[in-house]
Image (cartoon, rainbow, N blue to C red):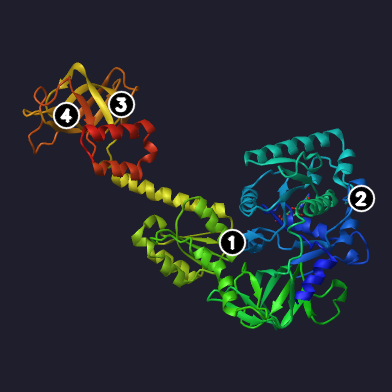
């Protein structure tokens, strides 16, 4: 085997780069993929384009043929043996093409609809690509929808654009500029690919039509150009095996199989392999390595071609016993003659155990469930950045037992009694149990949507709490009586005031601080503000500065104790403070942050000193 790998290295230095397609729904990912796969030549699989498992392989010859229309703009020499394009567009295959947290995707195509700009999933794709540091180019798709576009099928974009009417070219320019602005808003420089001043600093935009095929040669050419000039290091054959599970599928007659992408190295029939499983490592033996039957061989009965061995890079189906608990996104390792099986088992399981380590130590947080290791990893990364703690995770459909585990939060921390389910099915019984236990279950296949729903939920909880606590919140303020403006001296007291600092609200307890006979400062709480009038209008809040002339307040005094009296305990020389306490400050912090300005917090600190609150 070692010899196989060495032979590969000496024969050809570079392996085929792996390419994924991402983007918002309906931007044309599938159609673009179909167009790329189509051959212009009549004889079926011209140039040797081959359909694999989960991927299509384009050998160098096919690429040369497809880019011929570019003439002198075509890359001079295709140095990579070919290009492996992953067939299932979208987040899932991209996130599952992973190895130890980094991506095995060498380059991605982000598809953007030129008529729609950057949409939600586009932004999410950009975030994923950035997180994994994957280089990408943008297919600015659906150019044929520019008004009065005159198509020349499968043409180079530049040649087609030159043939368009002036108004069409103008519309194109306008939309291009708009797109570049939208990318700039995301902190990305973008440029039309043939005007790109620096490919390491600017994202290249390639205008395409998946319907007419225009721009597709440009797209392929740029992929080859960028991968072989800028990534040749990553594309060297290494002796080490790199292989990842993209999908776990039940196939009639074969049982549970795994579809893998072999990025580096070889796989052989009979190999002993190790993958990450839901209930622990799975160690099994390759029964068959399968790829689809070529199109023209359809009359052959068997659906698959069997291989004794396969070499990277390719997509292949592995049939083997005991795969039903295998996890998509897991690495696949082969047990070599000198390898310790247990070491390898621990190694593949570390993909899952590493994610476990992101769980909150105090066990406070939301429950997270996703379809695959890759998507779970992406969601957890997002939650980490958003500072949302996680109390538990699982992969696969949500069952009752998941709900039971997650529901410990109902009593511990209501705001985290939430299950964020990304791209997974929630069993009906699980949903019913959640309802019964008071758990919120949020399902989505866009991470942002899950996040938004969680935010919405925490906001409603916060709002309810504010309502509950509004009677106990004390906002900070300092008042001064307008000299002589005492309208009623007894319960209720009515006086005219200026707001020196902070905000005065209905319900605020008011106090003064005076030294007693021994010279010790004493706090006299006068009562609670029950009405505020400014210019004869009743108000709920008045803020510093807004007062000026004419703020009259009414203070109701408690009847059961000896009420403080005007003239004796307070008069127009005093400063009046809102009577804050440790508890009232905690309530402000917990539920009323959005009503407090920076100055207000500074005033809280000042009042704490004046009123001796610790
Ligand atoms: P996906 O969800 O990103 O895979 O999008 P699809 O490939 O399914 O395309 C969505 C819709 O847009 C389909 O109706 C396509 O026919 C259409 N479409 C895709 N690409 C183009 C294009 O370049 N031009 C036009 N006019 N329509 C397109």
Q: What separation in Å lies between label 4 and label 1 (alpha carbons)? A: 60 Å
The residue that disc 1 covers is: 375
Residue 273 drawn at (x, y percent):
65, 78
Residue 243 drawn at (x, y percent):
68, 69
Foreground mark, 2 or 4?
Answer: 4
Q: Earlier in the sequence, mark 1 or mark 2?
A: 2
- Which of these two is toward me, 3 or 399? 3
Position of the C terminus, as image quadrant, is top left
Q: Residue at x 72, y 75 (%)?
A: 317
Taking 183 as reference, is 414 left or right? left
Q: Quadrant of residue 247?
A: bottom right
Q: Residue at x 60, y 63 (%)?
A: 100
Under tag 3, what secondary structure?
Answer: strand
Kindly identify which numbered label has been placed on residue 501: 3
Q: Earlier in the sequence, mark 2 or mark 3?
A: 2
Foreground mark, 4 or 3?
Answer: 4
The residue that disc 2 covers is: 69
Q: What separation in Å lies between label 2 and label 3 (alpha carbons)? A: 74 Å
The residue that disc 4 covers is: 513
Q: In the displayed structure, would residue 125 be above or below residue 48?
A: above
Q: In the displayed structure, would residue 163 be above or below residue 61?
A: above
Q: In the displayed structure, would residue 301 be above or below residue 190?
A: below
- Mark 3 close to ligand 1, CB under 8 Å: no
Contact? badges 4 and 3 (CB < 8 Å):
no
Q: Earlier in the sequence, mark 4 or mark 1?
A: 1
Q: Residues within 10 Å of mark 1 (few under 14, many from 20)?
A: many
Taking 43 as reference, is 263 left or right? left
């Amino acid at each position: 085997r070692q010899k196989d790998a060495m032979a590969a290295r000496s024969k050809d230095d570079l392996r085929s780069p792996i390419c994924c397609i991402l983007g918002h729904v309906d931007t044309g990912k599938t159609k673009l993929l179909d167009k790329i796969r189509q051959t212009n030549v009549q004889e079926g699989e011209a140039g040797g384009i081959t359909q694999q498992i989960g991927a299509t392989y384009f050998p160098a010859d096919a690429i040369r043929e497809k880019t011929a229309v570019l003439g002198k703009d075509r890359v001079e020499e295709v140095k990579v043996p070919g290009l492996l394009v992953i067939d299932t567009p979208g987040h899932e295959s991209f996130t599952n093409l992973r190895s130890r947290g980094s991506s095995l995707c060498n380059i991605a195509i982000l598809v953007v609809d030129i008529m729609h700009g950057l949409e939600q999933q586009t932004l999410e794709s950009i975030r994923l690509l950035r997180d994994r540091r994957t280089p990408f180019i943008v297919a600015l798709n659906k150019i044929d929808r520019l008004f009065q576009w005159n198509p020349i099928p499968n043409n180079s974009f530049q040649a087609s654009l030159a043939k368009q009417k002036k108004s069409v070219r103008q519309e194109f320019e306008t939309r291009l500029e708009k797109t570049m602005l939208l990318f700039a808003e995301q902190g990305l420089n973008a440029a039309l690919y043939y005007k790109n001043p620096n490919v390491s600093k600017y994202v290249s935009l390639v205008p395409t039509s998946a319907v007419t095929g225009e721009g597709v040669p440009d797209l392929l050419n740029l992929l080859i150009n960028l991968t072989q000039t800028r990534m040749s290091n990553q594309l060297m054959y290494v002796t080490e095996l790199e292989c990842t599970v993209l999908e776990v599928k039940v196939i009639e007659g074969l049982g549970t199989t795994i579809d893998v992408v072999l990025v580096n190295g070889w796989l052989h029939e009979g190999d002993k392999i190790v993958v990450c499983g839901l209930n622990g490592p799975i160690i099994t033996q390759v029964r068959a390595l399968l790829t689809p039957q070529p199109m023209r061989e359809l009359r052959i009965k068997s659906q698959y071609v069997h291989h004794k061995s396969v070499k990277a890079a390719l997509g292949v189906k592995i049939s083997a016993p005991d795969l039903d608990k295998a996890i998509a996104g897991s690495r696949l390792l082969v047990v070599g003659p000198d390898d310790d099986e247990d070491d390898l088992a621990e190694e593949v399981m570390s993909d899952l155990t590493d994610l476990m380590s992101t769980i909150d130590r105090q066990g406070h947080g939301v429950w997270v469930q996703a379809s695959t290791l890759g998507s779970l990893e992406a969601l957890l990364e997002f939650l980490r950045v958003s500072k949302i703690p996680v109390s538990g995770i699982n992969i696969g459909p949500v069952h009752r037992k998941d709900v039971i585990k997650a529901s410990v939060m109902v009593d511990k921390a209501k705001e985290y009694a939430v299950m964020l389910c990304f791209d997974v099915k929630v069993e009906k019984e699980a949903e019913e149990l959640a309802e019964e236990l008071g758990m919120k279950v949020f399902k989505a296949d866009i991470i942002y949507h899950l996040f938004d729903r969680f935010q919405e939920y925490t906001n409603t909880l916060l709002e309810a709490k504010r309502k509950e606590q509004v009677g106990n919140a004390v906002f900070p303020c300092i008042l001064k009586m307008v000299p002589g403006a005492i309208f009623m001296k007894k319960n209720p007291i009515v006086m005219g005031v200026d707001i020196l600092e902070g905000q005065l609200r209905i319900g605020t307890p008011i106090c003064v601080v005076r030294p007693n006979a021994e010279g010790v400062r004493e706090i006299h709480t006068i009562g609670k503000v029950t009405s505020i009038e400014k210019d004869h209008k009743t108000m709920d809040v008045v803020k510093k500065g807004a007062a000026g002339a004419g703020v009259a307040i009414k203070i109701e005094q408690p009847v059961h104790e000896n009420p403080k009296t005007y003239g004796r305990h307070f008069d127009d020389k005093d400063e009046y403070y809102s009577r804050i306490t440790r508890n009232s400050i905690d309530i402000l912090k917990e539920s009323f942050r959005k009503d407090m300005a920076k100055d207000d917090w500074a005033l809280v600190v000042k009042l704490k000193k004046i009123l001796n609150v610790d």
